Image: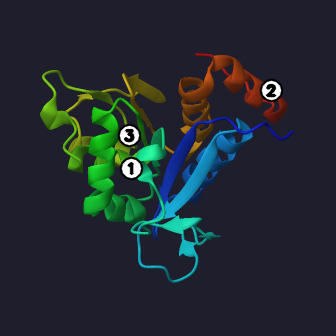
Amino acid sequence: MASALSSKKAIVFVAQGSEEMETVIAVDVLRRAGIQVLVLAVEIPSGPVTCSRGVRLVPDAYLGDNSIKISTFDAVVVPGGAGGAEILSQNAQVRCILSDFHAQHKIVAAICAGALAIKTAGIQSHLSEPLRITSHPSVSDQLVDEFSYKEDRVVVDGNLVTSRGPGTALEFSLRLVSLLVGADKAREVAAPMVLNFSL
């Protein structure tokens, strides 16, 4: 069932080695809610992006395309996947976007190893209290000293949303829907997917 487009817009980053479930589920669920999603790759355009398990995705656009007005978006999502997360967390433009969005109280979201991009963006360094965050267990040791690390499936701290891995991608994405367009819309999207969704 298609949903009417809302005025809300989200960027989902993708890079070589991104985790495909986390990327595609975020795109799919947000679009089911009528949120306009741009799948944005960070590498120089060269065709599809090959994800961590070999799934190939064709991005909507590439970072650096001056026709894209990043400032008009309401949320940004960083998927995991070890290789993709490393590329995204080390990209200067991605780090700047994450920092700017957080400062503007727009949604900044990361799942799995994508949480490392929150660290490299330096968001925590501007705050007096440690941000609550989670990630895939394999990268937790890189986050526990700087953040208030949690093991919940989805962690929300103000406008920062983090989650653990492929198995939590649906909950993560529905929480983003809830924050962007309301809990009622999240439940509406979850029902035909045969999912139980509760805040």
Residue 85 visible, this orientation: yes
Q: Nearer the viewer, mark 2 or mark 3?
A: 2
The answer to which of marks 2 and 3 sits earlier in the sequence is 3
Give the secondary structure at mark 1: helix
Give the CA distance from mark 2 to mark 1: 28 Å
Q: Which mark is residue 114?
A: 1
Please say which color scheme the image uses.
rainbow
Provide the residue designation for mark 3: 135
Q: Residue furthest right?
A: 1
Q: Position of residue 2 (x, y in %)?
A: 83, 41
Residue 86 or residue 151, whichever sits in front: 86
Residue at position x 62%, y 70% in the image: 58
Residue at position x 74%, y 29% in the image: 190
Q: Which mark is residue 195?
A: none
Q: Can you say which quadrant of the picture contains the N terminus?
A: top right
Residue at position x 35%, y 29% in the image: 105
Dot 1: within a 10 Å radius of its alpha carbon, few (fewer than 14), some, or many (20 or more) residues? many
Q: Quadrant of residue 82?
A: bottom left
Give the secondary structure at mark 2: helix
Amino acid tagged 2: Ala
The answer to which of marks 3 and 1 sits earlier in the sequence is 1
Residue 99 or residue 87, whichever sits in front: 99
Provide the residue designation for mark 2: 191
Amino acid tagged 1: Gly
Give the secondary structure at mark 3: loop
Give the CA distance from mark 3 to mark 1: 8 Å
Q: Position of residue 89 (x, y in %)?
A: 30, 57
Residue at position x 25%, y 61% in the image: 92
Q: Can you say which quadrant of the picture contains the C terminus?
A: top right
Amino acid tagged 3: Ser
Q: Position of residue 179 (x, y in %)?
A: 53, 25
